[in-house]
Amino acid sequence: MSGIPVGISTCLLGKEVRHDGGHKHSRYCTSVLAKHFDFRSVCPELEAGLGVPRPAIHLREYPEGMRLIETRGTDDHTGAMQAFIDRILPSLADLRGYILMAKSPSCGMERIKVHNPEGQVVRRDGQGLFAEALMRAYPLMPVEEEGRLNDDGLRENFIERVFAYDDWMQNVAGDRLSAGALIGFHTRHKFQLLAHSEKIYRQLGPLLGDLKSEPLADLANRYIHAFMEAMSQRVSRGSHMNAMQHLMGYLRDAMGEEDRKVLIEQMDAYRRGEVPLVVPMTLLRMAQRREPVDYLSVQRYLTPYPDELGLRNNV
């Protein structure tokens, strides 16, 4: 079975494509995520024709817009980069996520140095030209920088979004769209949505309550934009508690008095930060397995990604 298609900056795979002929090999990407993701690598600077090795470049802001200029000199590579971006973007439509190299004037997602026409740093809130174009073209696609994946919460959030977006692309998007497909997706991700944003959760239920109120494609477009916005919000311990308490309500018959007491104790321990999320979630999954509840059997909140990733061991 092939993995989920995810874009990645080529240097993160250990390829020597950086301006100095080096790489930024991410062992987490190549050793862990590569078992689940089918990586499609892109190095915008190399593929725009700048070569390896090449002069270092940075962003300079002019009245007419942002330019990609060599740090020592005045050679302008904006045109070559823009031509590459225009050429590559349509081929990335099937990706379910993207992992970018930080601090790059082409691939950096945020906090990129912006220089004035004389080459002096004037601000540090820029975006790489390729990264900015990618996120503008595909606003639903989960995008993250490799360095930020060292944060347990950001890593778990990014991977959860990739798997949810993959479900949408495989089962709802494009010519697969139907009322049943849309309702099925919402049903599968209901508790995830509740955990990430109760506000958006309460908006999307009524939105799907009248599927004839507007063309289905328009309604689905509004739905998935709101859904992915909700999923980008990190889940607090209190929000996980709320979702787990809702789940418990469906499992009353599957749990004896003692089991219920142990679960509540472990949920409280999680809320206090004494145990990771995997502990109460494992108890909920055991109860569901003991006496399956049909409604919960499809809930992605219980298994949003493969267990072997171990993500809930650290949040």
Image (tube, grey):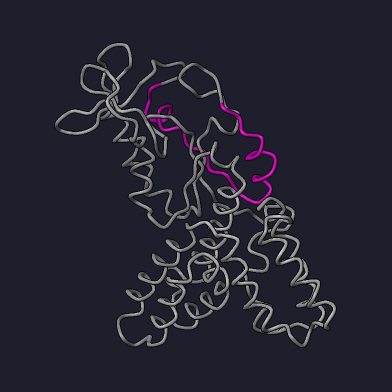
Counting from the top left corner in percent of width and height, residue 156 is at 60, 52
Q: Quadrant of the N terminus?
A: bottom right
Q: Quadrant of residue 179?
A: bottom left
Measuring 35% from the left and 74% from the top, which residue is drawn there?
217
Q: Please state which of residues 225 and 247 is positioned toward the viewer in this rendering.
A: 247
Q: Please state which of residues 39 and 190 is positioned toward the viewer in this rendering.
A: 190
Q: Can residue 77 be seen in this view?
A: no
Q: Is residue 230 visible?
A: yes
Counting from the top left corner in percent of width and height, residue 55 is at 38, 15
Q: Is residue 44 magenta?
A: yes
Compared with residue 181, is residue 126 higher up or lower down, i.e. above or below?
Answer: above
Q: Quadrant of residue 147?
A: top right
Measuring 53% from the left and 79% from the top, which residue is drawn there?
184
Counting from the top left corner in percent of width and height, residue 88 is at 38, 42
Q: Which residue lies furthest to the left in this view?
A: 63
What segment carries the magenta color?
24-50
Counting from the top left corner in percent of width and height, residue 236 is at 56, 59
Compared with residue 309, is residue 82 higher up or lower down, i.e. above or below?
Answer: above
Compared with residue 90, is residue 242 higher up or lower down, i.e. above or below?
Answer: below
Q: Please state which of residues 32 and 243 is positioned toward the viewer in this rendering.
A: 243
Q: Is residue 35 magenta?
A: yes
* Residue 240 appears left or right of 297: left
* Residue 22 appears left or right of 261: left
